[in-house]
Amino acid sequence: MTTLYLRYRNSPTDPWTTVPSVASAFPSLASGVLPAESVKLETAPQSVTPCGCPGTSTDDSYLILRATCAPIPIALETTLLTFLMQYKSATYHEAKFIRYGQGGYVTATLSLIEATERNGMLTLSFRLAAALADALTNT
């Protein structure tokens, strides 16, 4: 399991809001971390339709991270989905993953959030898009 950090804020003077704690389900994880079960990196347009089609754009100047989180207890669903919706609508949003943006925080937009419930567990998946130039120069 790998770790994925997300944070957002609405103005430059606001403190960063990080992922709510999932320590009740994953005691070994640090605060502010999502447990990623699988991660796929690719270049693609910043946004796509839910079917995954880029529409008329053939732009591939964004580094895309498609993440699927490890199953999380359903009791954390509301908290995590609220966080993801607030991240998506925030003015400033950043993601940190060891193989994304050279391991530092990089500005990344969120899309295609999918939450699947099964047997009392929640599986989250989503898509993050960072400008390729930002991801390559981030330190």
Image: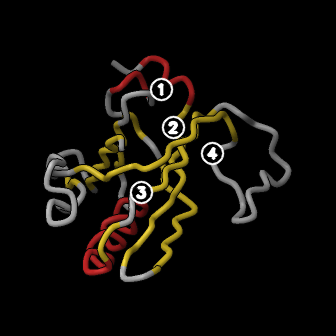
Mark 1 or mark 3: which is in front?
3
The residues tagged by marks 2 and 3 sit, at their Cα atoms, a distance apart of: 19 Å
| Disc 2, SS | strand
* 100 sits to left or right of 51: left
Out of 14 and 41, give the one closest to the viewer.
41
Please give the residue where the numbered disc 2 appears in the rendered image: 130
Residue 69, label in figure: 3
| Figure quadrant of the C terminus | top left
Asked if the residue at tag 2 contacts the one at tag 1, i.e. Cβ–Cβ closer than 8 Å, the answer is yes
| Image position, residue 19 (x, y; %) | 24, 57
Q: Residue furthest right?
A: 56
Check disc 2 and give the amino acid type. Answer: Ala
Q: Residues within 10 Å of mark 4 (few under 14, many from 20)?
A: many
| Image position, residue 5 (x, y; %) | 30, 44
| Image position, residue 113 (x, y; %) | 52, 65
| Disc 1, SS | helix
Please give the residue where the numbered disc 4 appears in the rendered image: 46
The residues tagged by marks 1 and 3 sit, at their Cα atoms, a distance apart of: 25 Å
- In the figure, residue 22 lies in which quadrant? bottom left
Asked if the residue at tag 1 contacts the one at tag 4, i.e. Cβ–Cβ closer than 8 Å, the answer is no
* 98 sits to left or right of 10: right
Out of 67 and 96, give the one closest to the viewer.
67
Total label count?
4
Check disc 3 and give the amino acid type. Answer: Cys
Query: What residue lies at 47% left-to-right and 26% top-to-bottom?
Result: 134
The residues tagged by marks 2 and 4 sit, at their Cα atoms, a distance apart of: 8 Å
Query: What residue lies at 25% left-to-right and 49% top-to-bottom?
Result: 33
Please give the residue where the numbered disc 1 appears in the rendered image: 134
Mark 2 or mark 3: which is in front?
3
Mark 2 or 4, nearer chain start: 4
Out of 91 and 30, give the one closest to the viewer.
30
| Disc 4, SS | loop
